[in-house]
């Protein structure tokens, strides 16, 4: 949550840390608001304004599943912070998530390599020396392809 500097009486390094936390949370709020209210595809989302939002860009942009965990207090003194936290959580609910599994080019090669290795280990007695050499060469080619 946010750090109320007057309440915590933070000074020195703690004050700098609290300011950095507040700044990061402010940028996170901006990103969530921009994503939930976005009316056009050309809207600029300020992901690059903080390290946290850069790290969470994939999840916040809808290509992932996100879980919001809110810590709230029943104390009357914390009512303002609790209400702000719940409003933020509500705005996060408006984000659309459509996670897509992305495959890199080498994934298919790795699966082919695994199938070939399984084939070699399952039926070695049925193979001729020539077939074994050919498969070994194919495996080396796939390994070079994956390494590239």
Image: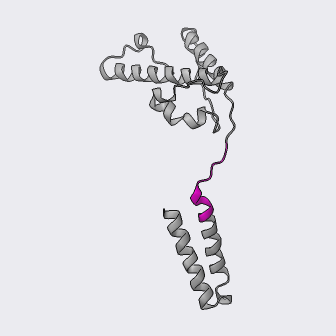
Which region shows up in magenta? Answer: 100-110
Question: Which quadrant of the view contains residue 34?
Answer: top right
Q: Please, which colouring scheme is shown? A: one colour
Q: Does the stretch in magenta take in 104? A: yes
**Residue at 63% across / 18% down in the picture?**
86
Residue 100: where, in percent of width, then height? 67, 44
Q: Residue furthest front?
A: 42
Viewer-side residue, 1 vs 107 = 107
From the top left corner, tell me how far across and down residue 124 is, in percent.
64, 85
Q: Answer with left or right where residue 2 lies relative to residue 41.
A: left
Left or right, residue 92 beside residue 30: right
Which residue occupies 37% across, 13% down?
9
Closer-to-camera residue (71/60): 60
The quarter holding residue 127 reads bottom right
Which residue lies at the image location 45% right of the left edge and 28% below the top edge? 50
Above or below, 46 relative to 83: below
Question: Exactly how many numbered labels are in the figure?
Answer: 0
């Amino acid at each position: 949550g946010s750090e109320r500097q007057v309440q915590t009486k933070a000074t020195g390094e703690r004050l700098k840390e609290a300011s950095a936390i507040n700044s990061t949370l402010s940028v996170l709020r901006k990103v969530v608001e921009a994503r939930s209210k976005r009316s056009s595809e050309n809207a600029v989302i300020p992901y690059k304004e903080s390290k946290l939002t850069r790290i969470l860009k994939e999840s916040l942009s809808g290509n992932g599943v996100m879980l919001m965990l809110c810590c709230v207090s029943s104390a009357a003194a914390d009512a303002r912070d609790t209400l702000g936290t719940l409003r933020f959580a509500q705005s996060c609910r408006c984000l659309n998530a459509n996670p897509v599994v992305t495959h890199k080019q080498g994934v298919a090669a790795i699966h082919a390599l695994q199938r070939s290795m399984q084939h070699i280990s399952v039926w070695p007695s049925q193979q001729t020396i020539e077939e074994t050499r050919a498969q070994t060469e194919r495996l080396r080619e796939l390994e070079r392809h994956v390494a590239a």
